[in-house]
Image (tube, grey):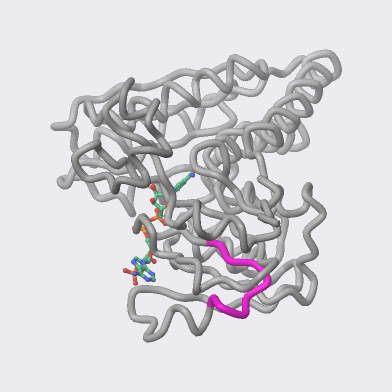
Amino acid sequence: MIKIAKLISGSKISAQIKDEVKAQIEQMKKENDTVPGLAVILVGENPASRVYVANKEKGCAQVGINSETVRMEDTVSTDDILAEIDKLNNRDDIHGILVQLPLPQQVDTGRVLMAISPDKDVDGFHPVNMGKLVAQQDCLVPATPSGIIEMLKRENINLKGANATMVGHSEIVGKPCTLLLLNEWATVTVCHIETKDLKMHTKDADIIIVATGVPYLIKEDMVKEGAVIIDVGINRITKDKASPDLLEWRKEDFEKKGATLIGDVDFQRVEPKASHISPVPGGVGPMTIAMLLKNTLKAAKMAVEKK
Ligand code: NDP
């Protein structure tokens, strides 16, 4: 008998979260006469960044968040962006600010992220929020890792005492996700580019979370029977780079778009061994947007409480 893992649908869970956020925003409008506002700074013409920002705008519209995008030329200086952030920090109708990354080379990304008021830092990248996460204080948590934990919880996956392996240790995903897992009492192993034997750390894990941007990094023999797999990676594979297997599996994508999106896990071979697995697309991606909206609502609530 062929076993099939339960798909963890980020699309479905994120739709539930958006409904909850929308209902709370309606209540906030009535009770506090406040509508959450999100400002996104988009620099240059990077096609991927433009798609991400358009998706964020669409998400805001769905739940009733006022959103505005500040578009800047890719020749912009650090000071130009800092001046925009200063204006947004001082606006009462803007509760969340995010700067779409990556920024052009001439811009000091660290200074830019530091300039966002921690109370409006809906991406959760400010060191104040990162520090609060370490200290287990209430704060704005980066959207992708909090989306991952939300997915696991809503699927009733036990985290307490579970052996979880986090592959990737970026500031955006791996590190905050590690802390969130620890806060849920998982036993966490963190792997990165210098990890000598990745398989040694994944093969007995109850939960594997992969965020590397390396397609097919997690293979069948690296996963134990019944493991829970969360695939964060987003890799665009064009027709000329696709294996015969992938060409067949994603035939429609290749015919329509000449490319497809896959994660970091060899999904077709790992899925039969897993108990639960998140797909790409339709897994962590939609959760990230939903959690960003939730963070914007949270920032607006914090502003109302401060009044
Ligand atoms: P980064 O490039 O910042 O980090 C990648 C991490 O993976 C690094 O810690 C790197 O280690 C590690 N790594 C790379 N190769 C290996 C390897 N062979 N073995 C073990 N570890 C390795 O990327 P991000 O964290 O920002 O994103 C990771 C992926 O997730 C990307 O594909 C990105 O597109 C996707 N992503 C998806 C999101 C979503 O909403 N679905 C949101 C954010 C990201 P080291 O630092 O030591 O080199």
In the picture, measured across the screen, residue 48 lies left or right of residue 37, that is left
Residue 280: give x, y in percent of width and height: 50, 42
Q: Is residue 148 above or below residue 200?
A: above
49 vs 202, nearest the viewer:
202
Quadrant for the C terminus in the image: top right
Task: Give the magenta-colored segment's residue range.
Answer: 202-209
User: Who's the residue at 62% across and 19% down the image?
Assistant: 65
Q: Is residue 266 above or below residue 47?
A: below
Count of marks overlaid on the render: 0
The quadrant in which residue 87 appears is top left
**284 or 172, which lies in front?**
284
Q: Position of residue 285 (x, y in %)?
A: 52, 39
Whether the magenta-drawn stretch holds residue 154 is answered as: no
Query: In the rendered view, does 210 fall on the left or right side of 133?
Result: left
Question: Residue 51's spot in the image, x, y percent?
Answer: 37, 26
Residue that appears at 63% across and 75% down: 205
- Ligand number 1: quarter of image: bottom left
Percent of width and height locating residue 221: 50, 73
Outermost residue to the front: 1
Quadrant placement of the N terminus: bottom right
Residue appearing at x 82%, y 54% in the figure: 156
Would residue 204 be counted in the magenta stretch?
Answer: yes
Quadrant location of residue 54?
top left
Residue at (67, 51) in percent of width and height: 4
Asked where in the image residue 274 lies, by quadrant, the reply is bottom right
Above or below residue 135? Residue 95 is above
